[in-house]
Amino acid sequence: MKIEESFSVARDLEEVWGLFQDVERLAECLPGAELTGRTDDGGYEGKVTVKLGPMTATFEGSATVETDEANRTGTVKGRGVDRRGGSQGRVEMRYALVPVDGGTEVRVDADVTLSGAAAQFGRTGLIKEMSRRLIGEFVDCIETKLAAATPEEAAAVSAGEVRGLSLLWSSLWATVVRWLRRLFGGRENQG
């Protein structure tokens, strides 16, 4: 599944780039994510927990991060397994930071592969809608962390856990509303 998103952070490019280089601090802003260690090759070990109504998936795995400072771009490759539910996930994400009026635009292009029970949510389009909502929480956390007056205040800022049922319902509702707009918007144009 392909996910392309962009969002703006109301902070200077260098400030945002600096945070993106500190993987441990940045991971604190990813809802449901937790770093648990480092790999021998310089990568990261961790887990991501997502609650989708009655289903909770905790993907444990590893990721590598490569950055291109000259172009302010990077690539994250990760894979994980939900041992309890039998799902597997793999992601390859590319990001680019671009200066814009009033801050920095972050462009994300990700290829996500899910198998097992979690793959059922990807087929319904809910994963894309949920990713939009999680990105909103991510941006809020980044801006709060960068606006902190002291390093101690910044260290205290982190994203909460993924609130699965409310996230699932709000994502489902947004999908239904978009579908209805297309359906009725198309009829108005015909009539």
Image (cartoon, grey):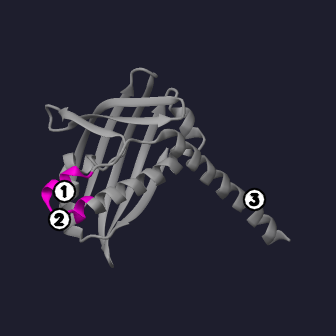
Tell me the residue at 26%/54% (across/down).
Answer: 74
Element carrying mark 2:
loop
Tell me the residue at 34%/34% (across/down).
Answer: 79
Whole-angstrom CA distance, mark 3 to mark 2, is 49 Å
**Location of residue 184 with respect to 28 vertically, above or below:** below
Element carrying mark 3:
helix
**Earlier along the polypeptide chain: callout 1 or callout 3?**
1
Residue 29 visible in rendering: yes
Closer to the camera: disc 1 or disc 3?
A: 1
User: Start and end of the magenta stretch?
Assistant: 145-157
Image marks 2 and 1: residues in contact by CB distance under 8 Å = yes
Which residue is the site of mark 1?
153
Q: Residue 62: x, y in percent?
A: 27, 33
Which residue is the site of mark 2?
149
Label 3: how many Cα within 10 Å (few below 14, some 14–19, many 20+): few
- Quarter of the image for residue 46 reads top left
Looking at numbered disc 3 in the image, what kind of residue is underneath it?
Leu
Label 2: how many Cα within 10 Å (few below 14, some 14–19, many 20+): few
Tell me the residue at 58%/45% (across/down).
Answer: 169
Which residue is the site of mark 3?
183
Residue 71 visible in rendering: no
